[in-house]
Image (cartoon, rainbow, N blue to C red):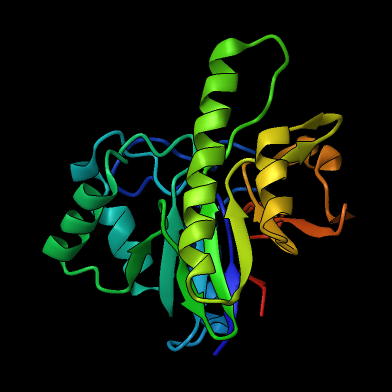
Amino acid sequence: MSLYTLGDLHLSLGTDKPMDIFRGWDNYTKLIQDTWNYLVKPEDTVVVPGDISWAMKLSETYEDFSFIDKLHGTKILLKGNHDLWFSTKKKVEDYLQEQGFSSIRILFNNAYPYEDYVICGTRGWIYEPNQPADQKVLAREAGRLRLSLEDGKKTGKQPIVFLHYPPIYASNESYEILQVLHEYQVKQCYYGHIHGHSCQYAINGERGGIQYRLVSCDFAQFTPVKVL
């Protein structure tokens, strides 16, 4: 078995939000499907760290979740900033069960053991100085990351963290998120959210004992990135 990750699928099969208006996104759903099913085996797991569907309501996600469910492997999804269809974990899980999407799991205040590791994560947030509302959201997301890592800690396994927002971007650092990562001795952190020319400011490598890697769809050339 292998563990992969690929973020920011930005699917819009059930709504009118085409991504191919952006450079490099031509025929992207076919690219995702082909590279995914070539690399990923049915027994593998793929973590999708946010920005999954452009749907505004859960009822509008059917085509997108159907597409994901048919891809190889078990899929573990976490919320991104554009996933406005996400209300509560229970409502999403109930919907997935009702529709028979049995290969999809939700990562939200919880964790999933994977061999000698445990998969943890949350959406995260980008810190912007002098923005009290953002600081409030950041504190909440740090708390959710802590809940996920606490759940993972019960397994006694080494955590691997997946975030939607980068905890470090250019000269900005989300100190609350970083504090939790270091407290739980996280060694690997994968994230998405960053696209296009902005990728030049994204961290890909070691910082403070943690290996960071950007795995947004276009940056990864629509190809799942192997973690383990």
Q: Nearer the viewer, residue 205 or 99?
A: 205
Q: Is residue 166 left or right of residue 9?
A: right
Res. 223 in view: no
> Which residue sits furthest left?
98
Q: Is residue 7 above or below residue 159?
A: above
Q: Is residue 104 above or below residue 29?
A: below
Residue 73, quarter of the rendered image: bottom left
Residue 27's spot in the image, x, y percent? 53, 55
The quadrant of the picture occupied by the C terminus is: bottom right
Q: Is residue 4 above or below residue 88?
A: below
Residue 147's spot in the image, x, y percent? 47, 51
The quadrant of the picture occupied by the N terminus is: bottom right
Residue 199, quarter of the rendered image: top right
Residue at 87% from the left image edge and 52% from the top image edge = 208
Q: Nearer the viewer, residue 202 or 140?
A: 140
Residue 116's spot in the image, x, y percent? 60, 84
Res. 108 in view: yes
Residue at 75% from the left image edge and 57% from the top image edge = 213
Q: Nearer the viewer, residue 86 or 56?
A: 86
Residue 53's spot in the image, x, y percent? 39, 46
Q: Is residue 109 left or right of residue 132?
A: left
Residue at 34% from the left image edge and 73% from the top image edge = 70
